[in-house]
Amino acid sequence: MSWKKTPPFFAWQAFKYAKNWAHFKKIWSFYGQWLSSFRHGRTSVSDEWAWITFPALNYLELNLQPEFRVFEFGGGGSTLFFCKRVAEVVTVEDNSEWFKTLTEMVQNKNYPHWTGYHVPPEKIPGMENKDFHNPGNFKSGSKSLDSMSFERYARSIDIFPEHHFDVVLVDGRARPSCIQQALPHLKTGGLLVIDNTERPYYLAPFKELFDQKFEVVLNMRAPVPYTPDFTRTTILRKIEDF
């Protein structure tokens, strides 16, 4: 999509996705930030921003506390974003080259409270026949990874105690499986942040649990920096243990 077509595309999406007038005004409040994010050289890494919707980014900026512990499935600008604001950040990443780059970025920033794990997927016979919608299958929805298991990746959070983390960001591979493994390790009152929930299969397996044990903090289709397309970032607060 060309730069000249980007602003009209924003307007079209604002009309398409706004549920009401308040939602429409909220979307438009981010237009200036969204447009400026396309300036040459700006990325989530250079800006040290989590690559999530603007409403979700703003919510976290306002609500993160210095003593918080954060776990993230998938690292990048979000890693730097959290490292600037909280006491502990743990990242699991499946791509070896990106993990090397991420490690260098964090070291260059001199953030001492970051721990990173490179956990690549494993090729397992029969994985191609399993349904990626099922969290118990530890499978990515990407066709290029159809034969790969992300069980070790999703279970990397299991080395930490239950109720250890104040925030868990799910923005990597096999997201339903990562949500499944993350839930016991999230504190009561903690935040579960799930990106790209315009894909309904991320949340569908947990609907009953989320309805009973969580409250919805944020769940709107909205602009996201560095890309023309609106997406949805869902933030849930754990209100009761289980």
Image (cartoon, helix red, strand yellow):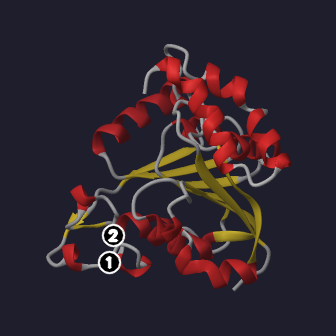
Say which of marks 1 and 2 sits in front: 1
Task: Pinpoint residue 115: horizontal percent, then vertical percent.
Answer: 50, 48
| Residue 26 disc label | none
Give left or right: position of 103 versus 35: left
Q: Mark 1 points at which residue?
A: 131
| Element type at mark 2 | loop
Q: Which residue is drawn at 44% across and 65% down?
A: 156
| Residue 139 disc label | 2
Answer whether residue 159 is visible to the viewer in this image.
no
Q: Residue at x 73, y 52 (%)?
A: 68
Task: Pinpoint residue 82: horizontal percent, then vertical percent.
Answer: 64, 42
Task: Pinpoint residue 25: horizontal percent, then vertical percent.
Answer: 82, 39
Q: In this view, does 214 lie above or below 45?
A: below
| Element type at mark 1 | loop
Q: Nearer the viewer, residue 195 or 28?
A: 28
Q: Are marks 1 and 2 in contact (CB under 8 Å)?
A: yes
**Could you tell me the amino acid type at mark 1?**
Asp
For disc 2, the neighbor class at 10 Å (few under 14, some 14 to 19, many from 20) is many
